[in-house]
Image (cartoon, grey):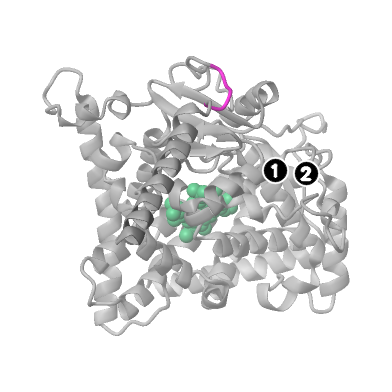
Amino acid sequence: MDNLWEILGGVVVVSALLFVRNSWNSSNAPLPPGPRGGLPFIGPKVNKEKIQPWIAYQKLADTYGDIIYHENLGRKVVVVHTYKAAHDLLSTRASIYSNRPVMTMARKLVGYDHSISLADYGPRVAYMRKAVQTELAPKNLGRFRPLQHLEVSLFLGKLLEAPDNFFDHVRILIAYQIFSIAYGFRPKSDKEPLLASIKKMMEDFAVFAKPGNFKVDDFPSMRYIPEWFPGASFIKFGREARGRIFDVVLTPFDIVKSRIEKHDLTPSVVATFLQSRDTSLPDTEDMLRWAAEAVFAAGSDTTASAILVFILTMAMNPEVQDKAHAELDAWIGDEEFHLPSFDEDRNKLPYLDKILWEVFRFQPVIPLGLPHCTTQEDVYEGYRIPKGATVFANLWAILNDGRIYPEPEKFDPDRYNRAVPEENINMDPRKVVFGFGRRICVGQHLAEASLWMAIASVLMVYKITPAKDNKGVNIPISAAFTPGVITRSLPFKCAFTPRSGKALALVKSSYADALAKVNTEIQ
Ligand code: HEM
C-alpha cells in the first residue's frame, strides 16, 4: 500500500512538473518578432499599389528575422522564411499545423468547407486526399497521356494560327486537359455554360481567398445577418457563389455517372472513383464529388500559370533555349522528328527537366503557399506560436534565398548540374513549391507531367523570342506578377517561330489530326 502511495505521489509530482514546464513554455515564451499593427499590403483596400505580399514579407524578414509574427484585425499570423522552419513546423509537427484558418465567407457561406483545399484536416479531408493522390500517382497517369498529347497538339496549332493570344491558349490547354482527366469527356466548346460556371467559380475563389476582403471573415457571427439587412450584400454574393460551385460539383459528376450506367468506360478520375468507392462508408459520393472538384479547381490556374512562367523565361533567356534545342536535336534528330513523348523520351532529356525545376523555382505560382492553422499552442526556437495562428511558409522566399540558390534572380537550369548536390544547396525546388506536410499538393505528379509535356513540345517546334515593334525593335519583357494567392505573369508579348520546315510541318499535321479527332468525337 505504501508503495502505491509512493507511486501515485511520484506521478503527481512528475505531472505537476510537466504542467509547470509546459505552461511556462506556453505563457512565457515570447511571440516571434515582427511589426506591431496593420500591414500596408494586407487587404484589397490598403493594397492599392498591388504590392506582392511574399516580397513584402521577405523585406520584413530582412529586418526581424526568418520567423515573423503580426496581427491583422485580431488574426494572429506567423510567416516562416526558411526551408528548415517550414519543414519542422508544417511537416514534422503536422499533427498541430494541418488545419486551415477560419475563413467564414469562403468556407461557411460559399461552402468550401466541403472541399479539400480549405476544410480543416480530419477524416473527410484525409479520405478525399487519398482518393485523388491514388488516382494521380505516377503509375496511374499513363492512361491520360493520349488526351494530354491531343490538347498539346491543339495548343501548338493555335500558337501558329493566333500567336498573340497565347495567354488564352495556355488557359484552354490546361482547362481542357484537366477537365478531361477529371471527368473523361471534353467540353464541346469554350462557350459551354459549365466552363463559364467553372471560370466564374475560380474568379470568385480568388476574391474569397484574399484576406481582408470580407468583414465577416473578421467577425464570423455576421454570417447570421439576414440577406435583406442593410449592408448585407455579402450574404447574397455568398449564396450566389454557392449555387455556382454546387453546380460545378454536381453536373459533370452526374454526367459521368449516367455514362457509366450506359457502360461507357472512358478513363477518368471520377469513373475510377465511382467504380472503386467503398460503399460501406457514409457520404462517400459527396466526398468524391468534392475530390473531383479539387482536381479541376486547384489544378488548372496553377498549372497554366507555371506554363506562362516557362514562356516568359524562355523569351528572356535565349541561351537556355539554345541548349534545350541542342539537347532535343541530339536525342530526337531529324529522321524521327516527333513531339517528345513523356514515357519514351523524358529520361533522355535531362536539361529539359532542369528547365522545369527552374520554372518552379523562379516564380512559384502559389508564392505564400496556402495558409495552415495551428490546433494548439506550440513553442519553436524559443518563440510561442499561438493556438489558432495562421501560418504561412513563404515559398517564394525559400526558393529565392541566395543561401540556397546562389544568384536567385538568374534563370539558370545549370544550377542543378552537380551530380551529388551539397546539402540543400540548389536543392530540388519540388521539395518546396508544392507545400508541406499533410496538406502538400495532391496534384504534383499531374502538374509536373502537364508542364513537362508543354515545355518539351513547345521547344521541339518553336523558338520563343520577344515580339518586335513596328520598327523591328524587341519589345522589352520583364518578369512581373499579379499579387494574388495564385500569381500570374502580367501581360507580355512574344513571338513563336517554327524552328524549321520540319517543325512547321509537324505542328500542322498534329494540329490537323487532333482537330479531326475532336470533331469526330463531338459528332
Ligand atoms: C504548377 C502546378 C501546381 C503547384 C505549384 C501547386 C502547389 C500547391 C501548393 C503550394 C499547395 C498548398 C500546400 C500546403 O498547404 O502546404 C497546393 C495544394 C493543393 N493542390 Fe496543388 N499545385 C499545382 C497543381 C495542382 C494540380 C494539377 C492539382 C490537381 C489535383 C492540385 C491539387 C491541389 C489540391 C487539391 C490542394 C489542396 C490540398 C489540401 O488542402 O490538403 N494542384 N498545391
The percent position of residue 262, horizontal first and vertical second, equals 26, 82
Asked if residue 207 is positioned above or below residue 254 in the image, the reply reads above
Marks 2,1: beta carbons within 8 A: yes
SS at badge 2:
loop
The residue sitting at 38% across, 20% down in the picture is 73
Give the quarter of the figure containing the C terminus: bottom left
The amino acid sitting under disc 1 is Leu
**As drawn, 518 above or below 386:** below
Sequence order check: which comes first, mark 2 or mark 1?
1
**Residue type pointed to by label 2:** Ile
Neighbor class of circle 2 (other Cα within 10 Å; few <14, some 14-19, many 20+) is some
Residue numbers of the magenta segment = 31-35
For residue 326, side relative to residue 1 (left or right): right
Near mark 1 (Cα within 10 A), the count class, few <14, some 14-19 or many ≥20, is many
User: Does residue 521 appear anywhere in the picture?
Assistant: yes
**Mark identifier at residue 404:** 2
Residue 306's x, y, as percent?
A: 62, 49
Q: Quadrant of the N terminus?
A: bottom left
Quick check: 409 above or below 8? above
Q: Is residue 301 visible?
A: no
* Residue 48: mark in rendering: none
Q: Give the foreground label among 2 and 1.
A: 2
Q: Residue shown at 66%/40% (left/top)?
A: 82
Tell me the element at label 1.
helix
Q: Residue at x 70, y 63 (%)?
A: 457
User: Mark 1 — residue?
Assistant: 399
Please tell me which residue is depicted at 74% across the width and 44% down the height of the picture. 313
Percent of width and height locating residue 285: 25, 67
213 or 94, which lies in front?
94
Rendered view: 315 above or below 136: above
